[in-house]
Amino acid sequence: MKTQVGIVGAGPAGLVLSHLLHLSGIQSVVLEAHRRGYVEERVRAGVLEQGTADLLRDTGVGERMSRQGLRHHGIELQFGRSRHRIDFAELTGGKGVTVYAQHEVLKDLIQARLEAGGQILFEVEGVSVQELQGPKPQIRFRKDGNDQELECDFIGGCDGFHGICRPSIPEGALKIFEKAYPFAWLGILAEAPPSSQELIYAHHERGFALLSMRSATISRLYLQCAPEEDILSWEDARIWEELHRRFEVVEGRMLQKGITGMRSFVAEPMQYGRLFLAGDSAHIVPPTGAKGLNLAVADVRVLAAAIAEYYRSGSTELLDRYSERCLRRVWKVQRFSWWMTSMLHRFADDNPFDVRRQLAELDYVTSSRAASQTLAENYVGLPFE
Ligand SMILES: Cc1cc2nc3c(=O)[nH]c(=O)nc-3n(C[C@H](O)[C@H](O)[C@H](O)COP(=O)(O)OP(=O)(O)OC[C@H]3O[C@@H](n4cnc5c(N)ncnc54)[C@H](O)[C@@H]3O)c2cc1C
């Protein structure tokens, strides 16, 4: 098999890349380890930056999002028993975010790619990437028991944090920057109308909590917990009790629950020969800033434009600058995600000084226009170059 761009992974990075390339008349094949149903139902992110939602709409895959997504023009910060609204629209000249689940975005992208004749091969096994420094890199894989080889001009390494693309780069070629946090999030999905119109980020003496939603009938709620916590020890009643302690919340049938670890991670550079890493394969942020999906889309926006320029003019200038351009945004988003995380969570070794400092920071963020604007500008998404 041959194609122009071989893409490993049908997550947000891989599917948006394939979609943008198609709009520039460039062929791609997407290889995905899981079955289609799994990809379309896996519950993950749900907050789309202004730029992410605009891109989906402008490229013809935002119709359902525009109809069903919830447009939010602010968030609430809760601390010291009171709530303070950060008004995004007022602070950023009318911008906001769209609450629309990641798996719904993926459904829309998969449908668009397949309707346009795009190739997405689900349930591939044993994927490996070869000849990355040569002019024709290859992807080997097994599909329906048959070994296959896909020859390409470029490979998009969009296979997430646990994929094979990043580990295929020889040791020493990448520099890794990493930070682990001493807590995790226990997240639930419940059949209950959201208890607030906007997201509430709560600083609480028992730990951080987030009240979020995926639609007008489904709530998404998170509690700070220990990273080694066993979800089996969290019966539904215990979760609701703990949530009620942190904010007023409407209960409903629990559809899903799980524990997510928190880390910050960056691999530099995001390119090795003709392999380009994008999204979680290159970087991870703690979810407090709601940035993982958005950063994946931001990467492939740069990559698709660079590949299109190569096919248009033969110039590799934009491809050569891919990593540097993405990393400027990645590090700013890392800073924001770390800052939100540090401001809102309880640390095991909290000393009273740190708690007072966090509360002073929250007071400052919600009482100074300059500070509120900084949060708002980052939350709705920094402008693109
Ligand atoms: C529980 C949870 C909650 C989250 N909440 C938020 C949030 O609120 N806001 C936010 O912005 N972000 C959130 N994130 C992060 C966000 O979901 C990710 O940043 C985003 O999915 C990254 O997209 P991606 O395409 O880079 O990687 P992924 O979505 O991980 O996609 C990678 C794809 O590659 C496939 N793959 C892996 N290995 C192989 C292989 N060897 N061969 C073929 N295919 C392979 C995987 O099956 C997967 O489909 C959350 C993540 C989790 C886990």
Image (tube, rainbow, N blue to C red):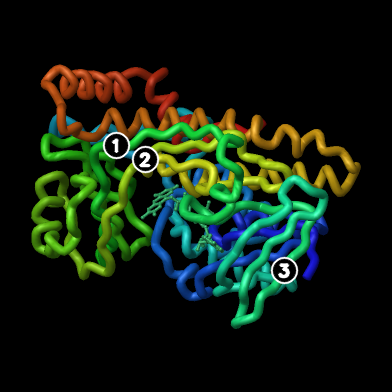
Give the alpha-carbon distance from disc 1 to disc 3, as whole Å: 40 Å
Q: Is residue 54 above or below residue 79?
A: below
* Along the line of sight, the residue nearer the viewer: 367 or 2: 2
Of mark 1 and mark 2, the one earlier in the sequence is: 1
Q: Is residue 385 above or below residue 65?
A: above
Of mark 3 and mark 2, the one earlier in the sequence is: 3
| Coordinates of residue 136 in the picture (x, y in percent) | 80, 54
Residue density around tag 1, few if under 14, some if 14–19, many if 20 or more, within 10 Å: some
Label pair 1/2, CB-CB below 8 angstroms: yes
Please tell me which residue is depicted at 89% across the width and 43% down the height of the picture.
314
What residue did someone put label 2 on?
A: 263
Give the alpha-carbon distance from disc 3 to disc 2, as whole Å: 35 Å
| Coordinates of residue 372 in the picture (x, y in percent) | 38, 25
Indicate the amino acid at tag 2: Arg
* Along the line of sight, the residue nearer the viewer: 254 or 5: 5
What residue did someone put label 3 on?
A: 149
Q: Is residue 343 above or below residue 156?
A: above
Indicate the amino acid at tag 3: Glu
* Residue that extends furthest to the right in the rendered view of this protein: 313
What residue did someone put label 1 on?
A: 181
